[in-house]
Amino acid sequence: MFYREAGQFKTTYAADMAIFPLREDRIGLAVIIVCAYALVFTGNSFLLQAVMIPFLVFSLAAIGLNLLTGYTGLLSLGTGAFMGVGAYACYKLTTAFPGLNIIICILASGLFSAAIGVLFGLPSLRIKGFYLAVATLAAQFFLQWCFIRVPWLVNYNVSGAIEAPLRTLFGVPIVGATATPETRYLVVLTLVIGLTWVASNIVHGRIGRAWMAVRDMDIAAELIGIRLLRTKLLAFAVSSYYCGVAGALLVFLWYGGAEYDVFNINQSFFILFMVIIGGLGSLIGSFMGAALIFILPIILGMVMPAILSPFGIGITAATVEHLRFMIVGALIIFFLIVEPHGLARLWQIGKQKLRVWPFPY
Amino acid sequence: MDMLYNVLIDPFVMMGSAPDLLIQTLWEGLVAGVLYALIALGFVLIFKASGVFNFAQGIMVVFAALTLVGLHEMGVPALLALILTIGVMFILAVTVERVVLRPLVNQPDIILFMATFGLTYFLIGFGELIFGGNPKQMIAQELYLPQGSTDLDLFGGLVRFQHIDIAAAVIASLIIAVLAVFFSKTRIGRALRAVADSHKAALSVGISLGQIWVIVWFAAGIVALVAGIMWGARSDVSFALQIVALKALPVLILGGFTSIPGAIVGGLIIGVSEKLGEFYWGGLVGGGIETWLAYIIALLFLLYRPQGLFGERIIERI
């Protein structure tokens, strides 16, 4: 009805290659972005601090992993550690150069993560699939050990934790204890939108197509002239960059401080869930997966006691936690059975239905 | 120079000067290796028969041990609890086949892998909900597992052998022998290997895939139970065991995903090198290297031989 492509003609190649060829999609995206910025004016700091900021951070990490696992087909279980590298690098940078703009620090910290990612990506040339997953586990455990055992990373402080110092942008504190949730949210939102835009351009271009060729069959890709070494390592670098920036954002704009344990193996699995549930090889899927995996447990935690209490079932916080685990686990299986290609595919099906509505096909 | 000396020479000097310590470390490594191998065996069983990389094997170990201890705490006699736990593992196998594997048949490997992730989360929540999240004591005594230890006088020092470790090694060898006979001599065992070779061919000669999967998951459940008892008797039964279970992955890589002897040899190699590395080299970098050494060894090994020690050679065609 309102989602019609009739009358929209493409007269240039550029228009044909556009990421959002339909006017309706562009309008929809603009509305979403405006709404996202408008959330600041609700003044609901719980919503911003406990829901939206982590959601965006996890989305960014999920995009990072999706570039590697979804687009290049290299399974990684080291996401948490790469996020940690970003966070610790950002801490080192901002304490070593206190005058440097914090945004630059955050963006630069991803570079360190990318370098480490390339190092641990080297085995991907010889091995793939589950074998590679185990190789990335080496990265996970080794890097986490480094976070504990190398005091230089935390500037020799006794607690062994990193803490976000006060940093300002245009005179407004954006990092540190005095920064308001609103400013933090704006910074995170802007960075995530910017990086998503970059990612979308990468995957729609030559590099992205090379990645997908490698994913679909690496030997065939090699035969048509794609250099595996470069392509796979580039995927590791870009993916780790995104994860690193997400890690830095997580510590500096959400937690405000962190210990090594934040970047443990469960964090890696968590991000992997988001990617798979959202849809492998889809940027919008990364957002949807992050929303489902992160926000759903919050809602369950709030709703479950309310549902169960009328039946006289007293429910403790621990029980809610256990039920949440069970429900998330069951949901993962459920979604895989109903739609193995993830929420992104459901979204596409929905759009297709809208296009031909009111006809079934 | 000093560093090189510390890394290359000093540890060996230490080994030579105190052979009793070396033997103690080796023994501990071997025992840890046997337990890793037991967990890895569960992975191999399922991977061989259904091509599913069962991530939930670690939590199955915890879950089986928890069920056993939890039932005993409710007042069930130990041996009856053991039988009931085996029953629970059977129900789990049937449920997994019905609810998870059957609807996902013919999906890509990674999807099945993820489904076992979902299973892991479900079992964590379920186990904690029913039995609580606190660490529990394994009922080693009630199950007639030997206690205490023997000290042997070797090379001028005392080497301590815990009886429970010896029992673990014996039981693990027994299980492996039973599985080997089962795979090569029985009807079902041969059907399992047929399924491993090709699902389609197995179906066409009248082997029921569903039945085979139930059997395999049940067997993996029993192996998990044994691993859980043994591991629980050495420390205690808690969800932290799940991370230990991840150590089975480098073991699998060393041994190859499809090989039972590989799982054993890989387990022993990882167990021994981990303990030796921690004891003789760990101090140089601040200790605690046990958490990642196994993975790095596996990683380096993979670069040299991607299919593992006993794995089938990977041949790729376009």
Image (tube, coloured by chain):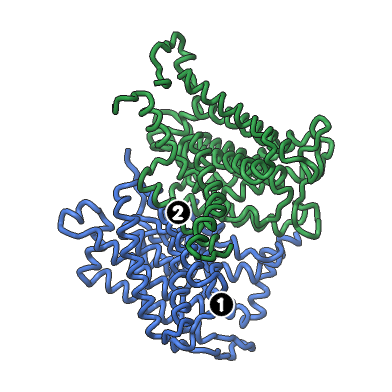
Chain colours: A green, B blue
Q: Indicate which disc residue B235 carries.
A: 1
Secondary structure of the residue carrying numbered label 1: loop
Image point 37% across, 24% down: which residue? A355
Residue B280 percent across, percent down from the top left: 65, 70
The N terminus of chain B - image quarter: bottom right
Taking depth in this image into account, of A98 and B95 the one nearest to the observer is: B95
In the figure, is residue A164 to the left or right of A287? Answer: right
In the figure, is residue A257 to the left or right of B34? Answer: right
Place residue A198 in its image quadrant: top right
Task: Tell me the amino acid under the disc marked 1.
Answer: Ser
* Image height of A302 relative to A190, above or below: below
Label 2 neighbour load within 10 Å: few <14, some 14-19, many 20+: some
Select label 2 or label 1 by which is in front.
1
Q: Indicate which disc residue B218 carries.
A: none
Q: Residue furthest top?
A: A11
Residue B265 percent across, percent down from the top left: 44, 68
Place residue B52 in its image quadrant: bottom left
In the figure, is residue B288 to the left or right of B219? Answer: right
Task: Tell me the amino acid under the disc marked 2.
Answer: Arg
Residue B204 percent across, percent down from the top left: 16, 53
Taking depth in this image into account, of A148 and B60 the one nearest to the observer is: B60
* Image height of A130 relative to A169, above or below: below
**Which residue bears the numbered disc 2?**
B305
Q: Earlier in the sequence, mark 2 or mark 1?
A: 1
Image point 31% across, 60% down: which residue? B97
Q: Mark 2 lies on which chain?
A: B
Q: Which residue lies furthest to the left in this view?
A: B205
